Each structure stands twice: as C-alpha cells, then as structure tokens.
Amino acid sequence: MDIDSLVQRINELARKHKAEGLTEAETLERAELREIYLGNIRRNFRQQLESIEIVDEK
C-alpha cells in the first residue's frame, strides 16, 4: 500500500469514527494502518539522520 492510499484510508476511518463510530474490525484496521504509517515516518527520519555528514568539526 502506498503512502497516499494509506493516509487516505486512515483519514476515512477518522471521519467515520467522529461521525458514527467504528466497528471493532475497523478500529483494529486503523491501529494497524497507523503503525505502518509511523514505521514509514521513523524509517525515513532515520535514513535522513544517517545521511547527514559533518563537514566542520568545530
């Protein structure tokens, strides 16, 4: 699942939660999608940190 469709589905579930509530299956799906999203954010952030190169020691 690409990041755009992942965010779109998370947002759909968030709107449904506010409007009418979620079923247990939808709540579990939302939690799983959030973990996938956060994992992507963490991985991208770690890659950015690892690619930083210190040029001046002072």
Image (cartoon, helix red, strand yellow):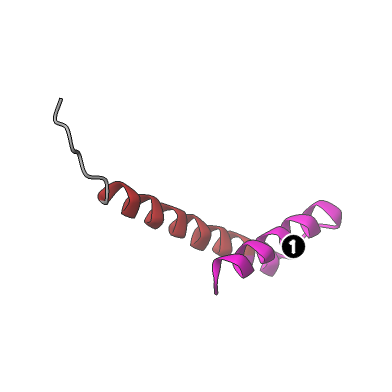
Residue 21 falls in which quadrant of the image?
bottom right
Q: Residue at x 58, y 59 (%)?
A: 31
Most extreme residue toward the top is: 58
Note whether residue 32 is visible. Answer: yes
Q: Position of residue 10 (x, y in %)?
A: 66, 61
Judge whether 22 appears above or below 54 on screen: below
Q: Residue furthest right?
A: 19
Tell me which residue sits at (18%, 38%) in the image.
55
Q: Name, please, the residue furthest toward the left.
A: 57
How many numbered discs, if any? 1
Asked whether, in this view, residue 48 is left or right of residue 29, the answer is left
Foreground pick, 54 / 15? 54
Q: Secondary structure at mark 1?
A: helix
Q: Quadrant of residue 11?
A: bottom right
Disc 1: CA contacts within 10 A as few (<14), some (14-19) or many (>=20): few
Residue span colored magenta: 1-29
Identify which amino acid the numbered label 1 is placed on.
Answer: Glu
Q: Is residue 19 left or right of residue 27?
A: right
Q: Residue at x 80, y 59 (%)?
A: 16
Q: Quadrant of residue 56?
A: top left
> Within the magenta stretch, is there residue 27?
yes
State the residue position of label 1: 12
Q: Residue at x 50, y 63 (%)?
A: 36
Up the image or down, 29 lies above or below 56; here it is below
User: Which quadrant does the N terminus fall into?
Assistant: bottom right
